[in-house]
Image (cartoon, rainbow, N blue to C red):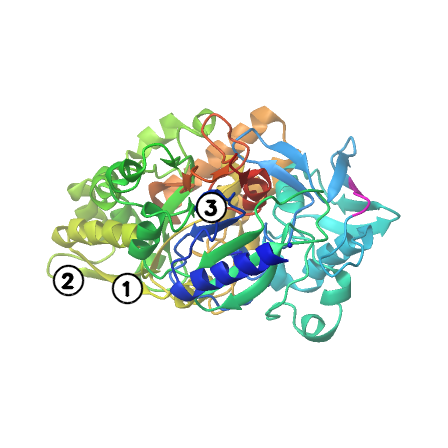
């Protein structure tokens, strides 16, 4: 994804070479010079559309963190540790119904205009006026008003809402009113392509082609002297293999995907400088269409949940690099204090052919009448492809035929968001507690009718009783919040709205030959994957040339 006289020209030329090659190059560091450029190798499964609307889930990863910033960075790996960004401070009222941000002085948009509290209030009211932009369902979760006065922004809620701080402060990119209140953006902000984004972040988009996005350092960035890395190239990869090769050969320095046999293929090529770290954060799961087709039948979903040997999927699909998931959806050991082992034991979800037969019969299927299902996945995600082939292999002798459809990333996204699938293989972003991934999967405010874009509840699960649990959580004390999450685990186990298969890690490979400052297991200052937003901004601001 992602910017001084002679050296600028040199970097630009080298960056262009990287973009044209599709594989990228560090563009510096030769002849003993310090590297001020890096290339990201992260498979998107598609070429770039050169749209940077941060509220469009299919492209937002290309602008958030690079161009657009949050109010506050909230670190999921350090118990929600906060780093003030656009907002220099924040404060809740004693009843947790009013949240006030103080906006930092001196921040400018990349076009030189000042960023004010009015821009912040405008952003949130833009989400109110356009439900398709409100990806975390803030306005349907009790947010009642957002007003600016001087350098403060005040948000009022109908109920205690402290857990929504993550969505408000960390997950909502702030956009400029003077751009988004006029022209194409004002007419249809949901479909606005935002081809030349104006943000407050450390980079601007200097050039975009379907094969590569090049970012350059924002001359107006508010943190003086940063970023130290001036140019970033983000080539488009439609398959893991070329991305992995570019990482292994040093053409790319920051990776974010599965590498088979990573120690031999990547680390052994440069044991001094090639490293990886994979902290688990969420689940890779099967989204099941609950509104139409066979998977609308609970018995079918239960049959599937008892049909998959997840340990074997991990072994065959990713060489054991990802732990198998549990049906309760709690990522372990990251959130072990939230896991309800007794509830999990009650259902005992593991591969059990007798139970598969029992539930298939209940749904009207047998060996004479096999269950035929299709599942969509992203073409080029070789790990997902291998995992699904193993699942297909496991299901066939149990009377379930699985048609695996690997399709281009953008097509996949469109089908996923609109509910145009029977099964879909995918993952969520999660958050600093299990509540967030469960809310993405189960809260009805995050879904939409078939044919309309759902922001995260792709299975389209809807239950008033479950919604009430999500609505109660923000005002509950710690003990009650744990009880609520236990109840939500019960929903996952009883209703099988999704089937977590493997734990989704923050894929992260990095090279220290010319660049330092990377996050590590000993210094977990941010989620490390390049696609983790807005965490990627924290990583970019920590990076600097070696020496």
Q: Earlier in the sequence, mark 2 or mark 3?
A: 3
Furthest-right residue in this view:
150
Q: What is the span of residues highlighted in magenta in the rendered image? A: 100-106
Residue under label 1: 405
Q: Please determine whether, in this image, residue 53 is positioned above or below residue 228.
A: below
Name the residue at 15% across, 54% down.
396
Frontmost residue, 481 versus 89: 89
Bin the neighbour count of mark 2 within 10 Å (Cα to Cα): few under 14, some 14-19, many 20 and up.
few
Report the mark closest to the observer, 2 or 3: 3
| Residue 366: x %, y % from top left | 15, 56
First in sequence, mark 1 or 3: give its number: 3
Q: Disc 2 designates what residue?
A: 369
Pointer 2 with pointer 3, Cβ within 8 A: no
Q: Is the C-beta separation of discs 1 and 3 under 8 Å?
A: no
Between the residue at mark 2 and the residue at mark 1, the CA separation in whole angstroms equals: 22 Å
Q: Is residue 32 left or right of residue 348?
A: right
Residue 217 location, x and y as percent?
A: 62, 53
* Vertical placement of residue 187 versus 441, above or below: below
- Measured from the top left, where is residue 269 in percent x and y? 28, 39
Report the residue marked by disc 3: 29
Kindly identify which numbered label has been placed on residue 499: none
Residue 399, quarter of picture: bottom left
């Amino acid at each position: 994804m992602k910017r001084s006289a002679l050296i600028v020209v040199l970097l630009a030329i080298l960056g262009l070479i990287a973009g044209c090659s599709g594989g990228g190059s560090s563009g510096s560091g030769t002849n003993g010079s310090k590297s001020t450029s890096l290339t990201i190798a992260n498979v998107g499964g598609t070429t770039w559309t050169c749209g940077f609307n941060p509220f469009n889930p299919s492209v937002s990863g290309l602008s958030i963190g690079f161009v657009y910033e949050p109010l506050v960075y909230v670190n999921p790996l350090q118990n929600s540790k906060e780093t003030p960004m656009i907002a220099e401070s924040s404060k809740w009222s004693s009843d947790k119904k009013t949240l006030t941000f103080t906006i930092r002085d001196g921040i400018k948009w990349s076009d030189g205009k000042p960023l004010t509290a009015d821009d912040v209030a405008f952003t949130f009211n833009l989400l109110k006026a356009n439900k398709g932009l409100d990806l975390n369902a803030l306005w349907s979760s009790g947010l009642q008003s957002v007003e600016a006065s001087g350098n403060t922004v005040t948000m009022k809620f109908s109920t205690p809402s402290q857990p929504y701080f993550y969505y408000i402060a960390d997950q909502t990119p702030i956009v400029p009113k003077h751009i988004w209140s006029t022209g194409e953006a004002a007419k249809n902000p949901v479909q606005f392509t935002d081809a030349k984004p104006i943000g407050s972040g450390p980079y601007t988009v200097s050039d975009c082609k379907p094969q590569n996005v090049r970012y350059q350092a924002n001359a107006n960035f508010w943190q003086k002297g940063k970023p130290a890395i001036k140019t970033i190239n983000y080539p488009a990869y439609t398959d893991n293999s070329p991305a992995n090769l570019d990482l292994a050969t040093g053409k790319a320095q920051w990776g974010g995907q599965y590498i088979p046999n990573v120690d031999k293929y990547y680390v052994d090529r440069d044991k001094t400088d090639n490293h990886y770290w994979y902290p688990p954060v969420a689940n890779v799961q099967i989204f099941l269409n609950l509104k139409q087709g066979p998977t609308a039948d609970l018995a079918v979903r239960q049959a599937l949940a008892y049909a998959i040997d997840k340990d074997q999927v991990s072994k065959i699909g990713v060489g054991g690099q990802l732990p198998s998931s549990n049906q309760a959806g709690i990522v372990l050991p990251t959130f072990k204090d939230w896991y309800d082992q007794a509830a999990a034991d009650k259902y005992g979800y593991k591969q059990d052919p007798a139970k598969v037969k029992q539930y298939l019969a209940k749904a009207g299927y047998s060996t004479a009448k096999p269950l035929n299902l299709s599942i969509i996945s992203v073409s080029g995600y070789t790990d997902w492809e291998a995992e699904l082939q193993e699942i297909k292999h496991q299901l066939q002798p149990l009377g379930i035929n699985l048609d695996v459809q690997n399709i281009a990333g953008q097509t996949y996204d469109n089908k996923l968001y609109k509910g145009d699938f029977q099964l879909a293989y995918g993952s969520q972003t999660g958050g600093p507690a299990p509540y967030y991934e469960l809310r993405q999967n189960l809260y009805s405010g995050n879904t939409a009718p078939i044919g309309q874009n759902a922001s995260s509840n792709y299975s389209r699960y809807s239950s008033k009783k479950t919604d009430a649990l999500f609505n109660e959580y923000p005002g509950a004390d710690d003990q009650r919040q744990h009880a609520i999450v236990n109840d939500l685990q019960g929903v996952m186990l009883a209703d099988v709205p999704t089937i977590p298969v493997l734990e989704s890690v923050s894929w992260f490979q990095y090279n220290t030959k010319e660049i330092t400052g990377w996050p590590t297991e000993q210094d977990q200052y941010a989620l490390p994957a390049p696609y983790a937003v807005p965490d990627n901004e924290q990583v970019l601001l920590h990076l600097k040339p070696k020496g």
